[in-house]
Image: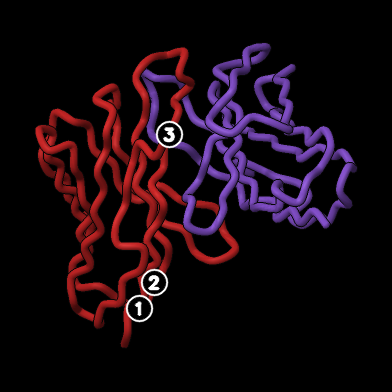
Amino acid sequence: QQQVKQSPQSLIVQKGGISIINCAYENTAFDYFPWYQQFPGKGPALLIAIRPDVSEKKEGRFTISFNKSAKQFSLHIMDSQPGDSATYFCAARKLGYNQGGKLIFGQGTELSVKP
Amino acid sequence: NAGVTQTPKFQVLKTGQSMTLQCAQDMNHEYMSWYRQDPGMGLRLIHYSVGAGITDQGEVPNGYNVSRSTTEDFPLRLLSAAPSQTSVYFCASSYSPQGFRGYTFGSGTRLTVV
């Protein structure tokens, strides 16, 4: 079962535009919601993360919006640049020490920013 | 400080062969995990460990074994390779809950089973 659903699968944005990627989760036993950025041939790298007691977190051009009641969170990339072209994954971490920091990932979104 | 190091970077196996994917981290992280990445599936957890001597299964553990004899190393063993195990494998590590800041991933091992 897919506990974290991500959309869209692919996204094309013009340079300077806003990229928006959405995720929805089913299980309420998550306590940490990171976004990862992955370039071809590389491992995913942590981009930004949020905890469920916060509705929004901003770091530079990247913002996470979090809606706990709707079990949804989204990544907004402002002033998108060609260098932002990558695959983005949302994830959710399961509560509990014995869960080993288990991250459940969404399916990924391939973002292409056109010059 | 090398972070998370995975070897080999590429591997081709024949069906039925066994092999071990190596993973080492030098950040003294307690948590380590193995994920596989397949197109349209995101990253799926294979096995994870909360410390030396402690491992547990993730979402897709069948056909894989792990052990964690030291904090630094977390090898993944394919017992009898199958074409369905063709994938990109990522090892990741992190601090324990109190210091959790998300996982640091290695650069991956691209495995093809023919």
Q: Amino acid at mark 2?
A: Ser
**Residue marked by disc 1:** A82
Q: CA distance from mark 1 to mark 2?
A: 6 Å
Please report, as a chain letter, where disc 3 is located: A
Task: Depth check: give the residue in front, A69 or A14.
Answer: A69
Give the x, y percent position of residue A74.
21, 51
**Residue occupying the point 50% across, 45% down:** B43
Q: CA distance from mark 1 to mark 3?
A: 28 Å
**Residue marked by disc 3:** A103
Q: Can you tell which mark lies on residue B103?
A: none
Task: Depth check: give the residue in front, A82 or B56.
Answer: B56
| Image depth: mark 3 or mark 2 in front | 3
Label 3's element? strand
For residue B46, side relative to residue B75 (left or right): left
Q: How many marks?
A: 3
Give the x, y percent position of residue A54.
13, 34
For chain B, the rendered hue is: purple
Q: Amino acid at mark 1?
A: Pro
Label 2's element? loop
**Residue marked by disc 2:** A85
Q: CA distance from mark 3 to mark 2?
A: 23 Å
Label 1's element? helix
Asked which quadrant contains residue B54, the reply is top right
The quarter in which the N terminus of chain A is drawn is: top left
Q: Dots 1 and 2: beta carbons under 8 Å?
A: yes
* Colour red, chain: A
Please report, as a chain letter, where disc 1 is located: A
* Residue B1 visible to the viewer: no
**Residue occupying the point 51% across, 41% down:** B104
Task: Depth check: give the residue in front, B52 or B47.
Answer: B47
